Amino acid sequence: MNKYLSTADFVIIVITAILFGVALFVKGLTQDLLLEVGILLISVKIISMNYSNKRLSQEILKKLEKMENTVGE
């Protein structure tokens, strides 16, 4: 799992889950819950963007290494 998510992603997931659970017990199933769901979706978006950036940066590094090897020959 560490291949796909960094430590920061795990921290965001845990904090968001804890806060979402607390909000459910404190506010109950009211309209304020929509705000909490919005925050949860923002956290999911941050995590997915982080994964995408990590994947793209690895691809760029591979291409740069390939170019460096080609120029070095």
Image (tube, helix red, strand yellow):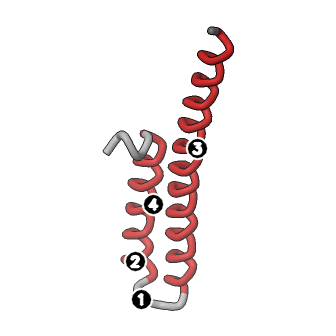
Nearest to N terminus: mark 1 or mark 3? 1
* Mark earlier in primary sequence (2, 1): 2
Looking at the image, the residue that sits furthest to the right is 71
Tell me which label, 3 or 2, sits earlier in the chain: 2
Q: Which residue is mark 1?
A: 29
| Residue 69 in the image: above or below residue 30 | above
Between the residue at mark 4 and the residue at mark 1, the CA separation in whole angstroms equals: 18 Å
How far apart are the two marked residues, 1 and 3, measured between alpha carbons?
Answer: 40 Å
- Foreground mark, 4 or 2? 4
Mark 3 — residue? 56
The spot of residue 64 in percent (x, y) is 63, 26
Q: Residues within 10 Å of mark 4 (few under 14, many from 20)?
A: some
Crowding at dot 2, Cα within 10 Å, few <14 / some 14-19 / many 20+, comes out as some
The type of residue carrying mark 3 is Leu
Q: Tell me whether circle 3 and circle 2 mark residues in contact (CB < 8 Å).
A: no
Judging by the rendered image, the residue that carries numbered circle 4 is 16
Q: Secondary structure at mark 4?
A: helix
Q: Residue beneath label 2, please?
A: 24
Separation of residues labelled 4 and 2 (CA atoms): 12 Å
Q: Are marks 2 and 1 in contact (CB under 8 Å)?
A: yes
